[in-house]
């Protein structure tokens, strides 16, 4: 589990550096948000390039949330039920987090916390092993190559897709089967939210998280590994050179069509509904796509791919393939681009 704790520590980093209102330091932390992560307007759509930072903000609506949005549309403080095993933390499935489920506890004073004395007053962050929150896929996997008839290049959108946020997460435990895959490892983390942090925007201005609609929310993200295989059709490419978030030799896959059945995380905070997911536009080179996954990382041609990629162009261009994937892993932090990775079991160039 050590590698999972390292991954979750990265997700916790933003929340644990300056977002607690009770910390003694008066210095405020600052996080940079690129221009591509700025809010969409009524007549424009945010496009997330795969070569840009993965720490995008998904604040498509600039409507300010109220301070009551800490756990929007979720149950009230569970400690009021009187069960001493309950904590104040509520999961995305409306479940109450138990003290016995707290694997790692971070306190405001920097010490390791004790589950027996864990409280909201001395809470900075926690990690829970053994479960994660997942949603069923919508099946939406559009690309401008295959769905040109519904792609509006001027507005950069697929006209047949609704981006209505969905809040339909299920709590899935290790050993459970979800979307035909068996969950083998999982973690989630909770921390004080992003409302009290300062964010540097692409235009050089700085705003408080609360001004961007970020709440004092507790759920912060999760990670999961699965056993099983998934077969899909889509587009693959091998990067010819370094591209900020993609290195030379990196192989990525973009599903195309509506048969994609991978589990969905996509944790985004919506001031109106709480933590939800929805399909989003992405782009690389001359291809645009919209799905709930971004792209799937399949390794690097210089070291860790055993599959035969001799028919994949070495100039970075996309080629259509049928592909079977295994060893699927997903990581996603709140309001961050999720990361999907997998191994290639079979590939056929179409």
Image: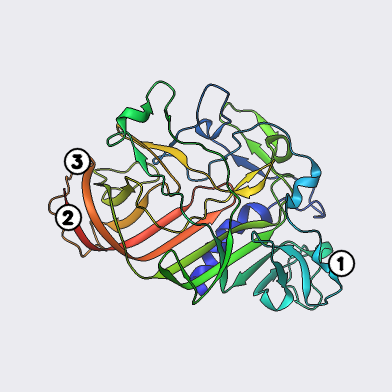
Of 75 and 61, the residue lying toward us: 75
Q: Residues within 10 Å of mark 3 (few under 14, many from 20)?
A: few
Left or right relative to 94: residue 37: left
How far apart marks 1 and 2 lie (CA) works out to 57 Å
- N-terminal of the pair, mark 1 or mark 3, is 1
Q: Horizontal and vertical percent for residue 187? A: 56, 68
- N-terminal of the pair, mark 3 or mark 2, is 3
- N-terminal of the pair, mark 1 or mark 2, is 1
**Residue at the farthest left position:** 310
Element type at mark 3:
loop
Q: Horizontal and vertical percent for residue 130? A: 56, 74
The residue labelled by disc 3 is: 315
Left or right relative to 140: residue 126: right
In the picture shown, does residue 7 fall above or below 157?
below
Element type at mark 1:
helix
Q: Horizontal and vertical percent for residue 285? A: 30, 34
Q: Nearer the viewer, mark 1 or mark 3?
A: 1
The residue labelled by disc 2 is: 348
């Amino acid at each position: 589990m050590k590698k999972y704790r390292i991954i979750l520590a990265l997700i916790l980093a933003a929340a644990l550096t300056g977002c607690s209102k009770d910390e003694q330091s008066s210095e405020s932390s600052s996080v940079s948000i690129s221009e591509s992560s700025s809010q969409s307007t009524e007549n424009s759509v945010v496009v997330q390039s795969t070569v840009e930072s993965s720490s995008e903000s998904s604040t498509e609506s600039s409507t300010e949330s109220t301070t009551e949005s800490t756990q929007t549309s979720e149950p009230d403080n569970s400690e009021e039920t009187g069960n001493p095993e309950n904590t104040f933390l509520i999961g995305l499935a409306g479940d109450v987090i138990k003290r016995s489920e707290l694997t790692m506890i971070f306190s405001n004073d920097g010490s390791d916390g004790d589950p027996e004395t864990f409280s909201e007053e001395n809470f900075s962050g926690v990690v829970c092993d053994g479960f994660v929150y997942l949603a069923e896929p919508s099946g939406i996997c559009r690309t401008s190559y295959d769905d040109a008839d519904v792609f509006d290049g001027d507005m950069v959108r697929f006209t047949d897709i609704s981006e209505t946020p969905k809040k339909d997460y299920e709590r899935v435990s290790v050993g459970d089967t979800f979307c035909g895959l068996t969950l083998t490892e999982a973690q989630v983390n909770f921390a004080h939210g992003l409302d009290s942090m300062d964010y540097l925007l692409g235009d050089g201005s700085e705003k408080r998280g609360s001004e961007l609609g970020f709440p004092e929310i507790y759920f912060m993200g999760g990670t999961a590994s699965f056993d099983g295989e998934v077969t899909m059709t889509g587009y693959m490419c091998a990067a010819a050179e370094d591209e900020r978030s993609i290195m030379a030799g990196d192989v990525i896959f973009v599903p195309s069509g509506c048969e994609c059945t991978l589990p969905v995380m996509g944790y985004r905070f919506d001031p109106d509904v709480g933590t939800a997911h929805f399909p989003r536009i992405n782009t690389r080179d001359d291809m645009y796509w919209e799905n709930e996954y971004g792209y799937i990382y399949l390794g690097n041609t210089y070291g860790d791919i055993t599959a035969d990629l001799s028919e994949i162009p070495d100039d970075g261009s996309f080629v259509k393939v049928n592909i079977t994937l295994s060893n699927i892993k997903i990581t996603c932090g709140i309001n961050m681009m999720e990361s999907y990775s997998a191994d290639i079991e079979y590939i056929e160039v179409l």
